[in-house]
Amino acid sequence: PSAFLDVRDLRVHFPTDDGVVKAVDGVSFTLERGRTLGIVGESGSGKSVTSLGILGLHRRGHTRISGEVWLDGEELVSAPPERVRRLRGRKMAMIFQDPLTAMHPYFTVGAQIVEAYRVHHRVSRAVARRRAVDLLGRVGIPQPARRVDDHPHQFSGGMRQRAMIAMALANDPDLLIADEPTTALDVTVQAQILDLIRDLQDEYRSAVLIITHDLGVVAELADDILVMYAGRCVEEGSAQTLFRRPEHPYTWGLLGSMPRVDRAARDRLVPIKGSPPSLINLPTGCAFHPRCPHQGRDGIPCRTEVPDLAQGSDHGVACHLPPTERRRTFAEDIAPA
Ligand code: SF4
Ligand code: MG
């Protein structure tokens, strides 16, 4: 594999009493250093599970994980758990929606960064502490030399998010995975955190994977976008392509529910009705068909055949509508009257 991160046909299935939950069912993508990929979808689309699969966090219990995850030339799905654990934190790190899931309330913020750093570096506490202060300063914590001894609860929500980012950066990870990194924050702080992630990426040239239901977030940060529905990729391409020439009816729906789309467009788009399907019993054919206003047109096998992700030059779309139809339909839907 030549890409820095190369995910091939990733599947993460959980057996339950009711049947097998196919949370991720054949997802492939690549990501280079210095680039940001946004994975978007509603909750239950499999986007978070995809990221946990990459990090090797689903390898316990009865989970069945298959496919390939190549990180910098090393395959992780078949690698020994020890090896993946070592890479986690050092080569890849994660930012969660809620910092309190990643930070321990009992220890100071500084102690936790020191710990994260010393897991992978044989350095004295004093050296690691200087690194912690430096990192807190880098992520915009004022007076880092004093705040380093605070506990997480002494920080505001936005500051805690910054501190968690500092912790994730402790070992200069090449791959940063952020799962809904700003969802819990108010709008102003959200914008600051997105700016911070962008700045840090410029500085570190890491590969960034943003997992979110919020198209505003990917519009801010992502170079490329992958849209997931029911455990599969339904559309992928550059951010420009996806925002300007989306071709999948589900993406049209997502864009319609995005507040930043200009009003003329939004008012004419039909929001997606219904909810995502059960991942145990997927609808036949295209999993989106029960919610799709375009299904069932003359001779198009929406209910019987699973559409492949057909690759154009810069754009992949999994929909049975003929390409001309897909373009025409969206143009009509959003064109101002
Ligand atoms: Fe809609 Fe059919 Fe395309 Fe699925 S394949 S998105 S049901 S038109
Ligand atoms: Mg999630």
Image (tube, rainbow, N blue to C red):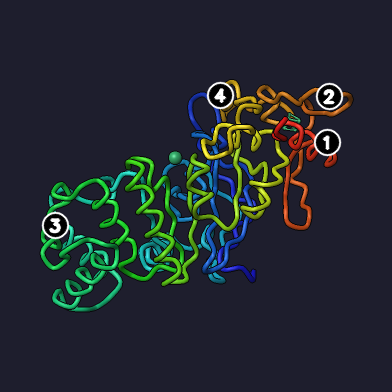
Which residue is drawn at the image coordinates 17% and 50% (left, top)?
155
Q: Earlier in the sequence, mark 2 or mark 3?
A: 3
Q: Are marks 2 and 1 in contact (CB under 8 Å)?
A: yes
Q: CA distance from mark 2 to mark 4?
A: 22 Å
Q: Amino acid at mark 3?
A: Thr
Q: Position of residue 28 (x, y in %)?
A: 64, 53
The numbered disc on residue 275 is 4
Q: Residues within 10 Å of mark 1 (few under 14, many from 20)?
A: few
Q: CA distance from mark 3 to mark 1?
A: 57 Å
Q: Residues within 10 Å of mark 2 (few under 14, many from 20)?
A: few
Q: Amino acid at mark 1?
A: Glu
Q: CA distance from mark 3 to mark 4?
A: 42 Å
Q: Which residue is mark 3?
A: 108
Q: CA distance from mark 2 to mark 1?
A: 11 Å
Q: Of discs 2 and 3, which sits in the foreground? A: 2
For the question of whether residue 147 can be seen, the reply is yes
Disc 4 C-beta below 8 A from ligand 2? no
Q: CA distance from mark 2 to mark 3?
A: 60 Å
The numbered disc on residue 325 is 1
Answer above or below: position of 228 versus 263: below
Q: Are marks 2 and 4 in contact (CB under 8 Å)?
A: no
- Tell which quarter ligand 2 is in: top left
The numbered disc on residue 297 is 2
Q: Of discs 1 and 4, which sits in the foreground? A: 1
* Element type at mark 1: helix
In the displayed structure image, the side of residue 94 where residue 49 appears, left or right? right
Q: Residues within 10 Å of mark 3 (few under 14, many from 20)?
A: some
Q: Earlier in the sequence, mark 2 or mark 1?
A: 2
* Element type at mark 4: loop
In the displayed structure image, the side of residue 306 where residue 13 appears, left or right? left
